[in-house]
Image (tube, grey):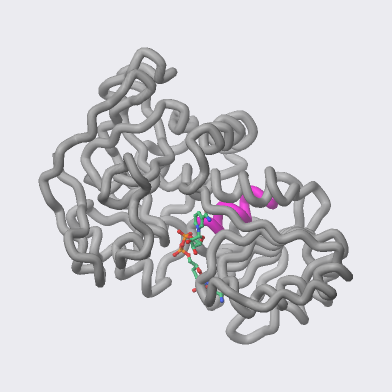
Amino acid sequence: MKAVVVETPGSASALELAEVERPEPGENDIVIDVAAAGVNRADVLQRRGLYPSPEGAPHWPGLEVSGTVTWAGDRSGHAVGDEVCALLPGGGYAEEVVVDGSLALPVPERVGLVDAAGLMETVCTVWSNVFLLAGLCAGETLLVHGGSSGVGTMAVQLGRAFGARVAVTASSEEKLAACRGLGADILIDYTMEDFVERMTVEGGADVILDLVGGSYLARNIAALRVNGRIANIASAESGSAELDFGALMRKRGTIRSTSLRARPLEERAEIVASVGENVWPLFESGVLRPVTGARFPLADAAEAHRLMESSGHIGKILLTP
Ligand SMILES: NC(=O)c1ccc[n+]([C@@H]2O[C@H](COP(=O)([O-])OP(=O)(O)OC[C@H]3O[C@@H](n4cnc5c(N)ncnc54)[C@H](OP(=O)(O)O)[C@@H]3O)[C@@H](O)[C@H]2O)c1
């Protein structure tokens, strides 16, 4: 089968379409004929040689796909012909993937097979961090940094769907308008406005979904309400910063930081099951929708990565074999 591999880590041109061996499935696994694969920031890091696939996963990138089951192990919980989307430890940039059945869910009604490719990584990340760990409740205020990103567009919708007031930061009017369309109430262009000052005027954030790290540690604590929770999922600016325990203590604040891919299979499967139970019905009732910003053929994965690195997109970028 064909897959997009990285022989020599580096720029987007390092992504090459190549012939690879399909991994052998086991009795818990399914084989999916891929309709589309989601592109994630982590794939850019992997391409640069900074975030290799974990042991046992294919060495080529790709954390999520949608498609049709062509083979199902006896203990996989799925059947041949099912249309599914799946969370992967790697290997999604391919014509076919093999994945443990516990990491796949049926494509929700009302969602197209291709658009479904962009759901698993974003929904599982937001659900596990903002809801399961940070415990966002109805009536609280959620601040989403990077509100127009793949993860951000899902966080805005989920926050709104569960009754929170949602604030976002983004770098342009167009991105903020997209966030407003998804249900964001407080729009902050962080290139023009200090989010700490604005959030202070707005009464502070109960939960902050952070992907910036670095100098945002102190600023996020300043923007929190008492008993606030920070859910960090990336460090676009820097992975280290000085923590002022006094400032955190005055807010009685909590900071958690997790990576979905690094979690044991059982934990990822629990998150997927919880998403299936709590979030999928909201796609089926039309409350939530996938936000696909761009589609590229699999062979043009380099173009897709260039778009992501330019931050010119809103929502998800997808690859179609
Ligand atoms: N820990 C995990 O398990 C996990 C899982 C999935 C994703 N992630 C992380 O979550 C982030 C989003 O992922 P994605 O795939 O959705 O990527 P993406 O669509 O490329 O989004 C990245 C976003 O970062 C924003 N950004 C950069 N600097 C910013 C700043 N100072 N303030 C506010 N926004 C800023 C950019 O928006 P602007 O143009 O507005 O700056 C862009 O929308 C990535 O950093 C990714 O690594 C983590």
Magenta-span inclusion, residue 156: yes
Question: Which quarter of the rendered picture does the N terminus lie within?
Answer: top left
Q: Position of residue 20 (x, y in %)?
A: 14, 43
Q: Is residue 227 visible?
A: yes
Q: Position of residue 202 (x, y in %)?
A: 82, 71
Span highlighted in magenta in the image: 151-160
Q: Is residue 80 above or below residue 197?
A: above
Residue 45, located in which quarter of the rendered image? Answer: bottom left
| Left or right side of 165 for 158 | left
Residue 24, located in which quarter of the rendered image? Answer: top left
**Quick one: which residue is furthest to the bottom in this view?**
192
Question: Which quarter of the rendered picture does the C terminus lie within?
Answer: top left
Residue at figure coordinates x 19%, y 68% from the top left: 13
| Left or right side of 207 for 75 | left
Principal SS element in the magenta part?
helix
Which residue is at the front of the view, 1 or 285?
A: 1
Q: Position of residue 201 (x, y in %)?
A: 83, 76
Q: Is residue 37 above or below residue 224?
A: above
Q: Is residue 284 visible?
A: no
Residue at figure coordinates x 49%, y 30% from the top left: 109
Magenta-span inclusion, residue 89: no
| Left or right side of 187 for 276 | left
Residue at figure coordinates x 77%, y 81% from the top left: 197
Q: Is residue 235 above or below residue 163?
A: below
How many numbered marks, from 0 up?
0
Q: Position of residue 118 (x, y in %)?
A: 42, 47
